[in-house]
Image (spheres, grey):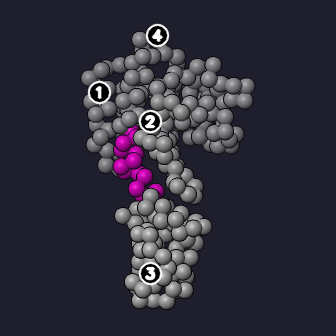
Amino acid sequence: MQLETSLALMASLSQATDAADLHRRVEKSVRAIGCEHFLIAMEVRLPVGPDIQHVDSGYPERWQRRYQEKQFVRVDPTLGYCKTNTAPVIWNPSMYSEMSHELMEESSSYGLGNGVSVGVHASNSVKSMFSIARDKPFGDEHEATLVKAAGQLIANAVHVKTAELIIPGLFSALAPPLTEREYACLQLAALGKGSGVIADLLNIAEPTVNYHLSKVMKKLGVATRVQAVALAVHLKILR
């Protein structure tokens, strides 16, 4: 592992301009520390509705298909670990239960037998996981320690850039278009105004306000005005 080269590549992650550029830079950084594959996964929990998830896998495509086919996501111990821990962990047999033993054996056959996973928690609602993998075991404790440290540095940089470059686009994709009147009603509802007050302010009938807000709730897939406002704020519909 060439320290100067590795550090320079890690520092360059902050200069990524889009998702494809970030992928290329991460790939170079991972290879510089003696690994061959990587996985980036981020989850943003919304106040209502489904969570937003982003995955960028540098694992072999055949393994990605196999992983989905066998639904290994249900038993993958690295996922559970990174949801509750932020310390880097070296993959080891003790992580795998009887239910995930098949995952351990099959991943090894695809050149993913050894690796490190790191969880990054910006908050309870925004978490990510970064994993690096390779075929051969780590040579000694010193190499394993260096890879763990490098993995943590890359994981934090990747978390920041993923949140900056990719998550806003996922929010936008979930944000339904609102008519001018729907937006006006929602904005006033966010200020705590009731239907009667909104009707007076917009000079429209109260049933019309209720109609517009019901349309907003339907578009957002929520059941109440409070949920609509909360989700609209997270999706940057309301600022």
Up the image or down, 3 lies above or below 166; here it is above
> Is the residue under label 2 in contact with that under label 4 (CB below 8 Å)?
no
Amino acid type shown at disc 3: Val
Tell me the residue that label 1 is attached to.
7
Tag 2, which secondary structure?
strand
For the residues labelled 3 and 4, say whether their Cβ atoms are less than 8 Å apart. Answer: no
Q: Earlier in the sequence, mark 1 or mark 2?
A: 1
Which residue type carries mark 1?
Leu
Q: Residue 197, which numbered label?
A: 3
First to last magenta residue range: 158-173
Report how far apart the C-alphas of labels 3 and 4 lie in the structure: 70 Å
**Label located before the other in sequence (2 or 3):** 2
Marks 4 and 1, the one that precedes in the sequence: 1
In the displayed structure, 37 sits above or below 220; it is above
On residue 140, which mark appears?
A: 4
For the residue carrying disc 4, how many other residues have a C-alpha within 10 Å: few (<14), some (14-19), or many (20+)?
A: few
Side (left or right) of 5 relative to 66: left
110 to the left or right of 179: right
Q: Earlier in the sequence, mark 4 or mark 2?
A: 2
| Main secondary structure found in the magenta portion | helix
